Amino acid sequence: MKAVKKVLLVTTVSGFVPQFEMSNVRILQNMGYEVHYAANYKTPSYGTDNHRLDGTGIIRHQIDFVRSPFTLQNIKVYRQLKKVMSSEHFDLVHCHTPMGGVMARLTARSTRTSPVIYTAHGFHFFKGASLINWLCYYPMEKFLSRFTDEQICINLEDYERARKKFHAKHISYIPGVGLDTGKIPPVIDVTNKKLELGLPVDRLILLSSGELIKRKNHETVIRAIGKLKAECSDLKSADHMQFHYVICGHGKLDGALKKLAEELHVSDCVSFLGYREDMMEIYQIADVFLFPSFQEGLPMALLEAMAYGLPVICSNIRGSRDLMGAIAKNSLDYCEGGILVAQADDVVSYCKAIQLLLDDNSRRQEMSKKNSLRAKDFSVQTVKESMEKIYCKLLT
């Protein structure tokens, strides 16, 4: 009887594969491989909503992953992964996320499971990162690259560093996980959607999307909006504001950000919509996309916003620069698709950038066209073709 061919995907959080890696799952399944997925399915903050995995044919393995490398819990994680790898005899391991990549490669080395692919969705060490990040993560990634058959990087800064400094057998650049333009739904009735969400129908919508955590830096935009409102001394309420700010996402800073909005007296022009599964419709009601992150790999939310033709105001960071095709040389700079802000926490520059785009409808329309075109360079088909070549190279 012919043995079943198996591949193991490893990530820290269980929502990663259904959100970003289903194209790779389909490639492997079409090649005749049984796909297994090791992740933490139980910890609430790591993603317990696993219904998107139902019906995919993916076999799940609970691993009690934690995000910190500095905890004894990782001994348990190592033992759990070792048990899975030893019993299932995988033909390939493809790991993602920092701790998923660390633990999977260490375990694969000890169980002699190979080949191993590691996709870095943004190294924790980068230009502008803290010294502690460089001291903790750079030596670890450089060491583990010796146990890596294929190192994939999704932005050019990471790729150049890995190519020059790391020891993986092969190092590839692939532009993200790919945007599936087939998911873009028909045009919706914008007014009805705004009413459904409880948003004012007569104002421009500024939109941000991302987990409510420090790295996503929603605080800076809220403060910028507070400054905009305060500078308009004749506005006694939000009734006369020309815009409304919408934040989609959930996370541990939910309460703190809502409290900040209250303290700055902007709760009447800021809406927190929580986690959404209708983002493809929400992009359609927006006029400008704000993405103030401190750190990204190649941000999918920003790419989706560009595909919907939204002008962008974003921080001048790795990943966002790749998508926008520009670098900010001053405190803020125009590029074809939006405005880049040099310092992610520069409230004044974000305030100015917002006002510049709100006041210039013709420029917003031109940026919209540029972003729609540029997003096509990061299509799922482009990524799929590259991943098929890598999988075929390592599995045949």
Image (cartoon, rainbow, N blue to C red):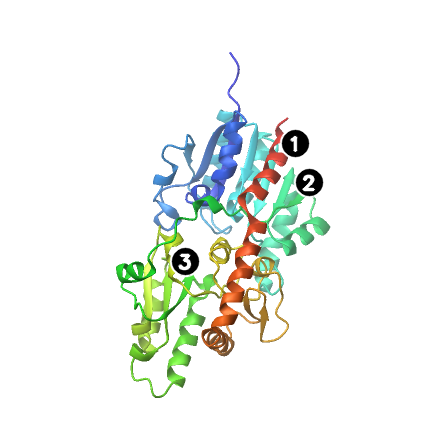
User: Badges 3 and 1: C-beta atoms under 8 Å apart?
Assistant: no
Q: Position of residue 304 (x, y in %)?
A: 47, 54
Which residue is more in the foreground, 361 or 86? 361
The label shown at residue 393 is: 1
The residue type indicated by label 3 comes to: Tyr
- Of the 4 image quadrants, the one containing the C terminus is top right
- Most extreme residue toward the top is 1
Taking 48 as reference, is 202 above or below it?
below
Q: Nearer the viewer, mark 3 or mark 1?
A: 3
Secondary element at tag 1: helix
Residue on which disc 2 sits:
170
Residue on which disc 3 sits:
283
Q: Distance between the Cα atoms at labels 2 and 1?
A: 11 Å
Report crowding for label 1: few under 14, some 14 to 19, many 20 or more residues within 10 A (C-alpha): few
Q: Position of residue 123 (x, y in %)?
A: 58, 53
Report crowding for label 3: few under 14, some 14 to 19, many 20 or more residues within 10 A (C-alpha): many
Which residue is more in the foreground, 81 or 392? 392
Q: Position of residue 63 (x, y in %)?
A: 43, 39
User: Badges 2 and 1: C-beta atoms under 8 Å apart?
Assistant: yes
Look at 35% across and 68% down and name the residue there. Answer: 256
Q: Quadrant of residue 124?
A: bottom right
Q: Which badge, 2 or 1, is on the more N-terminal residue? A: 2
- Most extreme residue toward the bottom is 234
Q: Distance between the Cα atoms at labels 3 and 1?
A: 38 Å
Secondary element at tag 3: helix
237 displayed left or right of 217: left
